[in-house]
Image (cartoon, coloured by chain):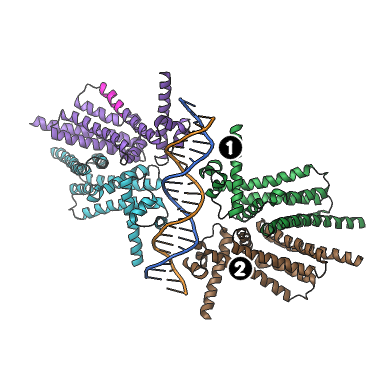
Chain colours: A cyan, B purple, C brown, D green, E blue, F orange
Amino acid sequence: MPKVGMKDTRKQQLIDATMESIAELGMQNTTIVSISKRAGMSSGIISHYFGGKQGLIEAALRYLLEQLGKELRERMAKTDGSPEQRLDCIVEANFSEFQRSALAAKTWLSFWSRSMHEPGLKRLQQINNARLYSNLRYSFAQVLPAGQATEAARQTAAMIDGFWLRSALSLDPMESFEAGERLTKQFIHDTLAKAGATNSAN
Amino acid sequence: MPKVGMKDTRKQQLIDATMESIAELGMQNTTIVSISKRAGMSSGIISHYFGGKQGLIEAALRYLLEQLGKELRERMAKTDGSPEQRLDCIVEANFSEFQRSALAAKTWLSFWSRSMHEPGLKRLQQINNARLYSNLRYSFAQVLPAGQATEAARQTAAMIDGFWLRSALSLDPMESFEAGERLTKQFIHDTLAKAGATNSAN
Amino acid sequence: MPKVGMKDTRKQQLIDATMESIAELGMQNTTIVSISKRAGMSSGIISHYFGGKQGLIEAALRYLLEQLGKELRERMAKTDGSPEQRLDCIVEANFSEFQRSALAAKTWLSFWSRSMHEPGLKRLQQINNARLYSNLRYSFAQVLPAGQATEAARQTAAMIDGFWLRSALSLDPMESFEAGERLTKQFIHDTLAKAGATNSAN
Amino acid sequence: MPKVGMKDTRKQQLIDATMESIAELGMQNTTIVSISKRAGMSSGIISHYFGGKQGLIEAALRYLLEQLGKELRERMAKTDGSPEQRLDCIVEANFSEFQRSALAAKTWLSFWSRSMHEPGLKRLQQINNARLYSNLRYSFAQVLPAGQATEAARQTAAMIDGFWLRSALSLDPMESFEAGERLTKQFIHDTLAKAGATNSAN
DNA sequence: AATGAATGAGTCTTCATTCAT
DNA sequence: AATGAATGAAGACTCATTCAT
């Protein structure tokens, strides 16, 4: 237990250092040395714990995905479960404080790019993309007809990712993230309201 | 003139080869050799024409941006200039055949990621982001009040980039691009329609 | 005594594991981990018992040499001591079951190569080479004149090592070892017979 | 022609430097840097010409084998082709000046050891071993009955390799090589003489 | 103008050794 | 006594750049 805990602590420190390095230097300029130096450890430790640089990179992406899932579950547990609140939760999870950090944001973007040509990363990304879409669609479907729910889910997913992407590249990321969260929620509410109006008109 | 033409031809061939290599191998695995081999030229020519690998990368991004601007201008010239048609043009330009090609899509994504840490690329990206937003805002502002126009423009820009990003990573990029174009236009029309309803109600 | 015995047992297990690793992976790919894993011990134990990898390697060679000496002494004790029988004993010891094992054979060859550039190993090898030659020469000298005995001893030593070398590299080591033993003995007998004929003719 | 010549020159210089390094430092301590420094070139050139260190190592072994074959063919061309002279040629080729050089001798021994665990090298070694045996057997068979020819060929091959091996490890390699050549030839002559005596007795 | 051979700094990885427990 | 986590030096390999032709 103490040793395992120690081991996990060091692994987490390396994952943190990896995200820091990617955020600061870019994935291109992130090396085993830039990571291990940030973690205050030797370079050999990376191969020791993760089998190599690639293993650490994948572990870092997996960590980001886990954090995202965790944020969502935590928020979901606190809502009354109405579709609108659930949709808001999804948006909030994707724009949470952690996800907004330059650290996470820049790391995500690096992973997106790299995952196009690395099967291991690509699979992780696609699972995450599918999860976001499927969560959105499920909640929309409780209010909208199937076809409209599908379309609204796709639009919302795109808007989340799009705001997120533009924020990461923005000159004022904080303002951009805040606006992104607000405008995405607004889009969702408008979409639900429009449906409500249509339904009540019928 | 003939020499300059020859020179420009060769430069363009190198830019094409760069995008091909990035699309196929990823930016990570794209080397001076992988590019020059694709172009059927020597590796030294890249330094000769572009001052180095970095110069060629930037030239390739500049080319993508020019293509996007060109698509937009060509489409704009054919419309009657109504706000709705102008907005559709913007969407269409961003989802044009060229932009949809795996070649362009993967290259864009690589540039996005890399531009976070390279000032030269970052500046080009931000100019483009600002241009898209400003074009959208201008047209929305002809129909909507300033505040709403700003919001609609931000939402639309995010949706375009978001669909575009998800398409590039999608298992079925073609379907994803088509749906993206259709759903973005639909969002614009709904937004304009809602405003029209509100206005006419006044 | 019990503790020393325990210690010696562990040291021998490490020597065995060293030969196994060299036989299986080659000296090139034999590491402290590949050895200690085979012995079911920790990697640190090697430095603890042998002062380092090099110490273990030398201990393993010393063990092989001891085995060879032991085989010879055991066989010598059972003969009536005639020159021909003594010579046969020497050959038999060099082609004994243990020496034939792929384990010993491959390890020997690795040591030969390495001993060229490591004084510690080289000294051990030269002692062994000298011992073989001197044993052969002693027995030949009881039958042949000094000059002929010297030549016969050198030829026999070369033939033993040569057969041994070719067997270790052969596609069918077992057949090769058997033939080597038989043909070396035959050479010895022919050499002695020729001398006898010459002598009796005089 | 000039470029190819230049290329071949550089490749040969690298092969020479490889043998020098192996002879001086051992294969264990021979690195890309120890080779390229000796050749007066950069370390990158090795990958450029041979695809990597392993490719250069194999090229060096191939070169040694070619030299051996060449020595044999040159000597064969000058004999009247009698079995005895042919056998002497084979011995002489295996103990030629080049083969005697500490450079070649130590390199051979390193290859022998290493070829046990590297298929590429092993194949080359076995071809050479088979060639030596087959050449010897052919010439013996012109004088001796098949069975005796086979045995004599095996004995001679072993003696050549054995003398060669002991010379490489000897304190006085030159004397050892000379004695090896002389005593191997003597063995051959004795073997042929014995057969002649037997035949003429019939 | 164009080539591509050559360079060598930079990267990841391996592994013998050390040392706190 | 024994472990194995951690280190960091040394290795092979990659690749953008240079430059003689």
Mark on residue B98?
Answer: none
Q: Secondary structure at mark 2?
A: helix
How crowded is the residue under tag 2: few (<14 C-alpha within 10 Å), some, or many (20+)?
some
Quarter that holds the C terminus of chain D: bottom right
Chain holding disc 2: C
Front position in the image: C30 or A135: C30
**Taking C122 as reference, is A98 above or below it?**
above
What is the magenta segment's predominant secondary structure? helix
The residue to which callout 2 is attached is: C62
Q: Is residue A147 visible?
A: no
Q: Which residues are magenta?
A: B68-79
Confirm whether circles 2 and 1 share one chain.
no
Front position in the image: C10 or A64: C10
Kind of residue sitting beneath label 2 = Arg
* Left or right: D95, with B103 as reference point: right
* Residue drawn where x is 55% and y is 41% of the image: D49
Kind of residue sitting beneath label 1 = Lys
How much space separates mark 2 and mark 1, taking CA atoms? Answer: 47 Å
Front position in the image: D13 or D81: D13
Q: Residue furthest top?
A: B1
Chain holding disc 1: D
The residue to which callout 1 is attached is: D7
Q: Quadrant of residue E18?
A: bottom left
Front position in the image: C73 or B102: C73
Q: Quadrant of residue B87?
A: top left
* Residue drawn where x is 76% and y is 67% of the image: C137
Q: Is residue C156 magenta?
A: no
**Taking B79 as reference, is C62 above or below it?**
below
